Amino acid sequence: MDVFDDVRRHYRQGDLDSALSLLEPLTRRLEPDGLPSPAQGPSLELLGLVFQGSGRPFDAADAIERASLVVPVSDEARIALASSYAQLRRIDLARELYLQLALSRRLPPDLMLQVAAGLDAIDSPQLAMQVCEWITERDENVAQAYYDMGVYSARSGNALYLTEALTHRALQLDPGNLHYRIGLASLLVQLDRDDEAINALDGFADEDVDRVTCESCLSRIASLLHRRGQPDLAKRCEYHAARLRRHGVRGPRPINALGGEEER
């Protein structure tokens, strides 16, 4: 396995520090005066992906832009570039690139979902919802697309029955998905439908709490459990919610029944 393959392996495994360490000598070779060579393009692209995953959007954008001058870059890299633009507050560029990717209608569902999430992150939830609709038009069995569409629908100010219906559809396709159940229960709590929220949580137990990554959802569910005489489980939810808040963990964006920005 050569260095390039080793870097890619570390990147795929999420070991970005090791990937950057291996890229250091390669990076020095990738800093010539003038235009990089086509042979350097793939390494520059990978460098940009690692930088973006490491929270260095300026370096990521620079590397991927340079790679694109000499080779066609992958869709994954173009999404990373759009995300870097968004982080750098170059919102128009980010939106344009996300839309170019979405309008091609050729990306696999996982990448289309990333595009939708990127559009939502730059306050374009209606466009994000449209991208999810395109996913379901091609494949009506992608549960995550329905769930995310429900979130974006609520954030767009649409009637909440649509969000609820889309979340139920996601659960029909993936009934064991804890995050969908938590999202539905959280929405129902906000709508003052405690009985239905409790039903949605059927089987929710101590061992499930640590798998939840939505702090505000946990807080709502804790309040529900207190009201329903389950103080031990409620306190465990409160403890984990506080831990997520303390460590700044950002999970999937929760469904907000008011359609506005959720606390993060």
Image: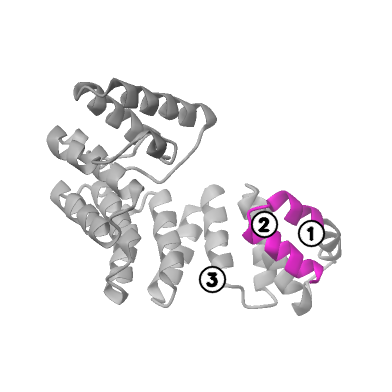
Locate residue 66: give its quadrant.
Answer: bottom right
Left-right relation of 142 to 80: left
Q: Can residue 144 be seen in this view?
A: yes
Q: Mark 1 points at which residue?
A: 23
Quarter of the picture containing the N terminus is bottom right
Could you tell me if the residues under marks 2 and 1 are in contact, i.e. CB atoms within 8 Å? yes
Q: Residue 177: x, y in percent?
A: 34, 52
Q: Residue 209: x, y in percent?
A: 39, 35
Q: Name the residue under label 3.
A: 75
Q: Is residue 127 visible?
A: no
Q: Which of 140 and 31 lies nearest the eye of the viewer?
A: 140
Q: Earlier in the sequence, mark 2 or mark 1?
A: 1
Query: Dot 1: few (<14), some (14–19), or many (≥20) neighbours within 10 Å?
Result: many
Q: Which of 32 and 197 lies nearest the eye of the viewer?
A: 197
Q: Vertically, is 109 above or below 167?
A: below
Of the numbered discs in the image, which one, if any, rests on residue 82?
Answer: none
Q: Mark 2 points at which residue?
A: 50
Q: Earlier in the sequence, mark 3 or mark 1?
A: 1
Which amino acid type is shown beneath numbered disc 2? Val
Query: Dot 2: few (<14), some (14–19), or many (≥20) neighbours within 10 Å?
Result: many
Q: Residue 51: x, y in percent?
A: 67, 54
Q: Earlier in the sequence, mark 3 or mark 2?
A: 2
Q: Residue 198: x, y in percent?
A: 19, 36
The residue positioned 80% from the left and 58% from the top of the image is 22
Is the stretch drawn in magenta largely helix, strand or loop? helix
Cα distance between the residues tagged 3 and 2 = 15 Å
Q: What element carries label 3?
A: helix
Magenta stretch in the rendered image: 1-22
Could you tell me if the residues under marks 3 and 2 are in contact, i.e. CB atoms within 8 Å? no
Q: What element carries label 1?
A: helix
Q: Is residue 222 magenta?
A: no
Which amino acid type is shown beneath numbered disc 1? Leu
